[in-house]
Amino acid sequence: MDNCIFCKIIKGEIPSFKVYEDELVYAFEDINPITEGHTLIIPKKHSQDLWEIEAESLTAVHLASKKIMDAIKKVLKPTGVVAMQLNGKSVGQAVFHYHLHLMPRYEDTPPLPVARWELTPGNMDKIRETTEKIKAALR
Ligand code: AMP
Ligand code: ZN
């Protein structure tokens, strides 16, 4: 895609801190890292989000994430890693080329706000109703 910043990174038109590449995937360091080792993993074939991405690219991105997670664990020794992916402007997606964030956490870094929310029990009738709606749409 011509005006996509991540497509330009894949083509080498914009510089990046590449950590991994294979036939289907490219992975590089986020230049606004939330913690050390904040890595983005993207499919080489452009697709906007989880609604649009094809199974082959999706599988490749997530298999690469496992490799990179192992490498991050080995060299950076985080206490944990958040694997996060945003779909849509309303939830904060800023770059519209599918990307999986790997965000390591260390002893001295505060928990990511997105990984912490107050647990309030929902309305079980409403949850059951929603379950049925999603199940019906999956058929
Ligand atoms: P999102 O909000 O999930 O769309 O996140 C987009 C991410 O891309 C942000 O964390 C940015 O810091 C990151 N980003 C944007 N441009 C670049 C770039 N040229 N190189 C590396 N990371 C980038
Ligand atoms: Zn793109």
Image (cartoon, grey):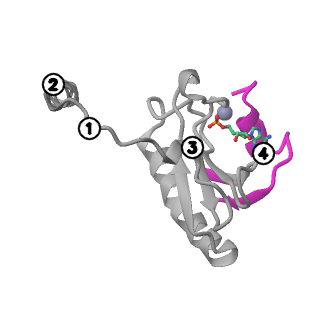
Give the structural element (helix, strand or loop) at label 4: loop
Residue where numbered disc 1 is placed: 121
Ligand 1 within 8 angstroms of badge 1 C-beta: no
In the displayed structure, would residue 90 be above or below residue 71?
A: above
Please tell me whether mark 4 or mark 1 is closer to you in this view. Answer: 1
Q: Under tag 1, what secondary structure?
A: loop
Q: Amino acid at mark 3?
A: Pro
Q: Are marks 2 and 4 in contact (CB under 8 Å)?
A: no
Is the residue marked 4 within 8 Å of ligand 1, measured from its CB?
Answer: yes
Magenta region includes residue 59: no
Could you tell me if the residues under marks 1 and 3 are in contact, i.e. CB atoms within 8 Å? no
Image-quadrant location for residue 131? top left
- Mark 2, Cα crowd under 10 Å, few <14 / some 14-19 / many 20+, is few
Is 111 positioned to the left or the right of 122 in the image?
A: right
Residue at which label 3 appears = 113
The disc, 3 or 2, on the residue closer to the chain's N-terminal end is 3
Residue 71 is situated, as x and y percent measured from the top left of the image, at 63, 72
State the residue position of label 2: 129
User: Magenta region: which residues?
Assistant: 1-26
Secondary structure at numbered mark 3: helix
Task: Please give left or right for residue 14 compared with residue 132 in the image.
Answer: right
Marks 2 and 1, how far apart at CA: 16 Å
Label 3 lies in ligand 1 vicinity (Cβ under 8 Å): no
Q: Secondary structure at mark 2?
A: helix
Residue 67, how many percent across, how many down?
Answer: 56, 67
Q: Is residue 22 magenta?
A: yes
The label nearer to you, 3 versus 2, is 3
Residue on which disc 4 sits = 32
Q: Residue at x 67, y 31 (%)?
A: 95
Q: How far is the residue under mark 1 from the one under mark 3?
A: 20 Å
Amino acid on which disc 2 is placed: Glu
